[in-house]
Image (tube, rainbow, N blue to C red):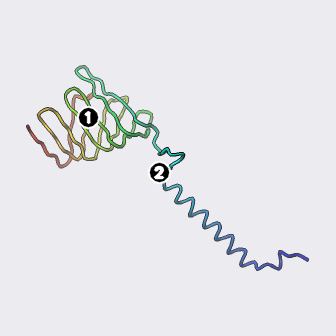
Amino acid sequence: MNYFLQLNRRLILITIFLIFLFLIIIQFFVSKKNIVIENGLELSNADIFKPKFSINNDSQKIFITAEEGNFISSDEVMLKKNVTFKSNNFSIETENVIFNRSMQTAYSNDKSYFKTNNVIIKSNGFDISDQGNRIIFYGKSTVLLK
């Protein structure tokens, strides 16, 4: 006698459907999580950790650091979390920057803080071009002179 035919087919189909639905829900929540803790270490989906770059021109070097970065193309890198531009003359702090390594340009649409000895500029973004010789600030900007 075939015992499989004695089982309720509707109950088997509902059970299979619920297991399938449960697996899809688990996969959805696992894929949405950016940071996974494994053996006490945090892993994220960044391509570069603690990236360091520089913009070189005749008069100064501008050093760029961040917590993490992702490659957008072979030349462009998206720098994230505590992005800092430092030279002997100024510093700029922001959260997200797109840096072009070959053109040695950078821009951001996030709140930025430009600091020198005598000036502080708060803006809603900036654009560094001409190998760091030209900086344009975007959006609502505040200039504080000391």
Q: Amino acid at mark 2?
A: Asn
Please tell me which residue is depicted at 14% across the width and 46% down the height of the picture: 142
- From the image, tell me which residue sits under label 1: 128
Mark 2 and mark 1: Cα distance apart in space: 30 Å
Q: Amino acid at mark 1?
A: Ile
Position of the C terminus, as image quadrant, is: top left
Residue 133 x/y as whole percent: 22, 28
Indicate which disc, 2 or 1, sits on the residue closer to the N terminus.
2
In the displayed structure, does residue 106 sit left or right of residue 4?
left
In the displayed structure, does residue 28 sit left or right of residue 108?
right
**How busy is the neighbourhood of tag 2: few (under 14 within 10 Å), some, or many (20 plus)?**
few
Q: Quadrant of residue 121?
A: top left
**Secondary structure of the residue carrying numbered label 2:** loop
Mark 2 or mark 1, whichever is nearer to me: 2
**Secondary structure of the residue carrying numbered label 1:** strand
Q: Quadrant of residue 61?
A: top left
Position of the N terminus, as image quadrant, is: bottom right
Residue 141 x/y as whole percent: 16, 46
- From the image, tell me which residue sits under label 2: 34
Q: Considering depth in this image, is 73 or 51 the residue closer to the camera?
A: 51
Residue 81 x/y as whole percent: 35, 43
Label disc, if present, on residue 61 of the rendered structure:
none
